[in-house]
Image: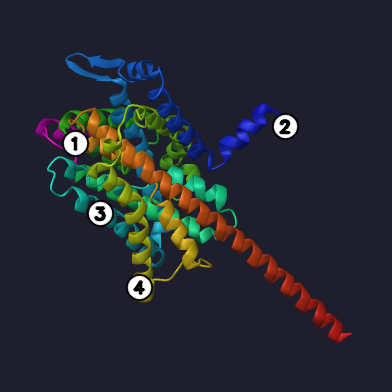
Amino acid sequence: MSLTLRWKQFINNDASSGIILVLSALLALVLANTPMISAYYYFLEIPVAIKIGNFEIAKPLVLWINDGLMALFFFVVGLEIKREIFYGQLSDKEQIVLPFVAAIAGIVFPALIYTALNYDDPIAINGWAIPSATDIAFALGIFILFGKHLPASLKLFLLSVAIIDDIGAVIIIALFYSQDLSTLSLIVAAVGLVVMFILNRSKVTSQIPYIIVAFIVWAAVLKSGVHATLAGFAVAWFIPMRKDESQSMSHHMEHKLHPWIGFFVLPLFAFANAGVTLVSTGDTKLITPISLGIIGGLFIGKQIGIFSACWLAVKLKLCQLPQSVTWTQLYGVSLLCGIGFTMSLFIGSLAFEDQGLAYQTQVKIGVLIGSLLSAVVGTLLIRQTGKKSVTSNSNGQSNNHASKTQTLQNQN
């Protein structure tokens, strides 16, 4: 098999983006703990500027990644959520109850654990939302790699929880991590969205006008004090969408951008934000209330919140377990939801944006350890339940075959 064919097969694998994400984070960790650390930070601090007349955006490269490329990520997230709400998994009211309850509990419980450990520190408490996030690329990648024999309905449950979790993250960022609002910039952004609405209703089929106005909205939001990534999410809701995917601009944009998000934007974000120096870090820094709150929230809060909420909802007959799914399998997915990584690092960068490297180091340590624990334990459980599922199916098929053979013998 040629290298080109192997690469195409790897790219088309749903788990491949998660693998590249892991490799990017590991590379950042290696560079941050070797003599290459100065080159690593030099790369992140490269100044990049865009100037049109008196309007100028000048930021180091790391902020262009966090404010610019991540806005593109949230744009694709918005397109996916809109599609799922109107035509997908989230359009079925009966199927949405369980993942909705799970996602809400998966946001609340980690936040409570973090708050319990940091309530007396007015600065540290700003990070309460960090362990509430789920990294869909990591979680889904692990499920696809090690849960091949598990029911498809369990994968849909995981996707639904992650999507609702993303909606929660957007709301949290908008409400709690926006500051010093500029009325003029917000008005410009609002006018831009109105223009996109008019383009949509006028059935404009060219993508160029939407892209130009979307850039203006992003720039206005960037200057407004509201985090720029929210512009990407808002713009997505004004892109024309049709049930017929061949006629849908929304589907075409999502399809074209998805590989760029999975293989460039998120890996670059992981590389820029996962680098934490561990060589000179003492034990005291590893066990701060901030890092412990994040670890406890991701590894303990997520699994307890999601699983207990699902159990209670099913016992109260508000909903049912997904078809062919066992409680053990659901618990394994609850663990995978504790992989916060990308979104947790992102919220952490917002929570302690003005606090310096020490706070960001605590965030990174907490997110890496909490996500790693959730990934390892979740993988072991998912893999084990997958093996049991295969064994059970094999035994069932053998019993059916034996029963049919015995029946034929009796007839003869």
Query: Which residue position holds label 3?
Result: 113
Residue 393: x and y, percent? 65, 66
Q: Do the residues labelled 1 and 2 touch (CB within 8 Å)?
A: no
On screen, residue 40 versus residue 252, left or right, reads left
* Dominant secondary structure of the residues highlighted in magenta in the image: helix
For residue 110, which numbered disc appears in the image?
Answer: none
Can residue 135 be seen at all in this image of the molecule? no
Residue 14: x and y, percent? 53, 43
Q: Do the residues labelled 4 and 3 touch (CB within 8 Å)?
A: no
Residue nearer the viewer, 136 or 241: 136
First in sequence: mark 1 or mark 2?
2
Instruction: Say above or below: 61 vs 91.
Output: above
First in sequence: mark 3 or mark 2?
2
Residue appearing at x 19%, y 18% in the figure: 55
The amino acid on which the numbered mark 1 sits, given as a three-letter code, is Val
Whole-Å distance between the Cαs marked 4 and 2? 51 Å
Q: Is residue 181 magenta?
A: yes
Query: Which residue position holds label 1?
Result: 226
Query: Which residue position holds label 4?
Result: 318
